[in-house]
Amino acid sequence: MMNCKKTVILITLFLHVIQINTMDNPQKTAIVIGASSGIGKAIAQELVKSNYIVAVTGRRIHLLNELKNTNPDNIIVHQMDIEQIEESRASLSALLQLMGHVDLFVFNSATWAKDPADFTKDKEISWPCLERMAQVNVAGFVGLTDIMLEQFTKQGYGHIVGISSVDAMRGSAAFPMYCACKSFMSTYLEGLRNKYIQAQIPINVTEIRPGWVQTSFEMGPEAYWVATTDEVAPQIVESIHNKEKVAYVTRRWRLIGWLLTICPDWIYNTLGGF
């Protein structure tokens, strides 16, 4: 009889601890901007595997719904067009009200000068293409990140992740505007990280620098070390879990990052990038 009472007490305490832990540690939530395909989609799927509730955004609602169908209980679909900045900001604010709290914000959305991407150095890029790149890759990024920083400041915690590129490190003759946009993201994220470290606010900032990743466009003959989205997504999520400041994916692109840092201008300008 005594053993039965002890068993009941132990079970009761065990259930109580589980209840407390559940209350103190609600299921983690994330928002992935630009998750209808490519790296963003793969990141969202990987976060779901890590037991996140993930809100996915993008213009192509049918692709987002296809993604949701893979895991209806853990994926929230929210259509958004980053080119329409004010509408996107309002849309993100509405999404935040729906979710209540958010642990992680991943900005993956980006556009090239042309679709499909053109990597030839002698291509002509029209002003509308350049304007669209600045609108999405710079203004869109800052506009939505600003909303999230306000949310994270209110919460007292959060994690900002920007999917930048190895191209952020130096300008390339093949796509100078894209490099400039990614360089802006890189510098902006570094500034935010410095700001919250100095303020001693637990808002983490991570910059992800992918190399060549096979997404929806055709790779040119100069592409090397090309990885699939299924290869890079687990490494990105691991870097997020580890709260890394800057992470290269795949990891060997750290070597290219180092070479870009030390390469003299006369060699880099002769090669046209590497």
Image: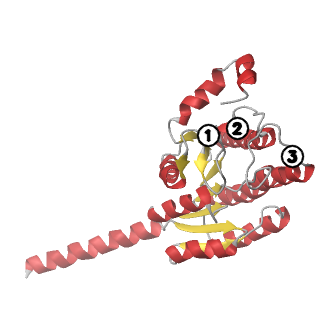
Distance from disc 3 to disc 1, alpha carbons, whole Å, reads 21 Å
Judge the density around disc 2: few (<14), some (14-19), many (≥20) Cα neighbours within 10 Å.
many
**Can you say whether 136 is above or below 178 in the image?**
below
Label located before the other in sequence (2 or 3):
3
Q: Nearer the viewer, mark 2 or mark 3?
A: 3
The answer to whether residue 71 shows anywhere in this view is no
The residue that disc 3 covers is 125
State the separation of the CA atoms marked 1 and 2. Answer: 17 Å
- Relative placement, left or right, of 79 versus 139 is left
Q: Amino acid at mark 2?
A: Ala
Vertical comparison of 217 with 220: above or below:
below
Disc 2: which residue: 168
In the orientation shown, which residue stands out farthest toward the front? Answer: 221
Residue 159 or residue 221, whichever sits in front = 221
Question: In the rendered picture of this protein, how many numbered marks are placed on residues?
Answer: 3
- Camera-nearest label, 1 or 2: 1
Let me know if residue 135 appears in the view. Answer: yes
Q: CA distance from mark 2 to mark 3?
A: 19 Å
Could you tell me which secondary element the residue under label 2 belongs to? helix
